[in-house]
Image: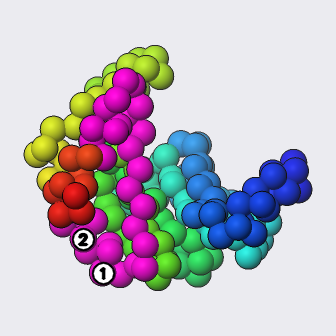
Amino acid sequence: MWNRYSAALEPLREAGRLGTLLFQFPHRLVPGGPAVEFLRRCRERAAGWPVAVEFRNPGWWHEEHADATAALLTELDAAAVAVDMTQTLATSVPPVAPVTSPDLALVRFHGRNTAWGTGTKEERFRHDYTPDELSEWAPRIREMAERAREVHVLFNNCCGDAAVRAAESMRRLLGLS
C-alpha cells in the first residue's frame, strides 16, 4: 500500500510541489512506548519525505508528555501540527503551537462546533470563525514563523465557504492581504 501511495505522490515531489505528508493519527494512538515505536516505523517508511504529524489524542500535548512529544517529533524530523478545535470535550486537543522542524510548521483549524463529539461530519465541521477566535492564533502563527521557514495554515471548517472566509480573515489579521 505504501509503495502505491508513494508512487502516486512521486510526480508532485519531483516537480517540487509536495508540501508535506500529513500523518493524522486517531485518538486511540496514546502516548507511550508502543506508539513511539509505531511513529518511528512510520517515519522510516517515509524516509526522505517531508512529514507532519497531527495527534487526535490530547494526551500527547498535556503537560506531562508535551516536552517528550516535541523532542520525539524533532528527532524524527517531523513537523508538529497545531490544532484549533472546540475545547469543551475530554477529547479536545489543546491549542498548543509547537515547532519541531526548522523547515515547516502547520496549524489546522477544524472549527469549534460543540457537535464535534456527537454530530455528523457536516455538523462537526460547520463553524464560522469569529475575528476574536482567529485573533487568538495570530501571535502564535507569527511566533511559529520566526522558528520555521514556512508555516502552513489550513482550514477544515469545510461546510459552505466558511473555510475560505476564515482564511481570508486570517490573511488580513496577519497583514498578508
| Residue 28 falls in image quadrant | top right
Give the class, few, some or many, for how many residues have Cα within 10 Å of label 2's Cα (few <14, many ≥20).
few
Kind of residue indicated by mark 1: Glu
Residue 87 vs residue 154: left or right? left
Q: Residue at x 42, y 61 (%)?
A: 152
Is 165 situated above or below 42? above
Q: Residue at x 43, y 20 (%)?
A: 122
| Residue 176 falls in image quadrant | bottom left
> Disc 1 vs disc 2: Cβ atoms closer than 8 Å?
yes
Q: In this rendered view, identify the residue nearer to me: 30 or 101.
A: 101
Residue 36 vs residue 113: left or right? right
Place of residue 143 in the rendered image (x, y in percent of width and height, measured from the top left):
26, 74
Place of residue 65 in the rendered image (x, y in percent of width and height, measured from the top left):
43, 66
Is 154 situated above or below 141? above
Queried whether the magenta region covers residue 158, the answer comes back as yes
Q: In this rendered view, identify the residue nearer to me: 124 or 162.
A: 162
Screen quadrant of the C terminus: bottom left
* Residue of label 2: 142
Return the residue found at the far left: 132
Give the class, few, some or many, for how many residues have Cα within 10 Å of label 1's Cα (few <14, many ≥20).
few
Tell me the CA gap for discs 1 and 2: 7 Å
Place of residue 38 in the rendered image (x, y in percent of width and height, measured from the top left):
71, 61
Queried whether the magenta region covers residue 162, the answer comes back as yes
| Residue 67 can be seen in this image | no
Is 106 situated above or below 83? below
- Report the magenta residues as a range: 139-167
Q: In this rendered view, identify the residue nearer to me: 159 or 33.
A: 159
**Badge number at residue 146:** 1
Helix, strand or loop under label 2: helix
Place of residue 49 in the rendered image (x, y in percent of width and height, measured from the top left):
70, 70
Q: Residue at x 41, y 31 (%)?
A: 158
Kind of residue indicated by mark 2: Arg
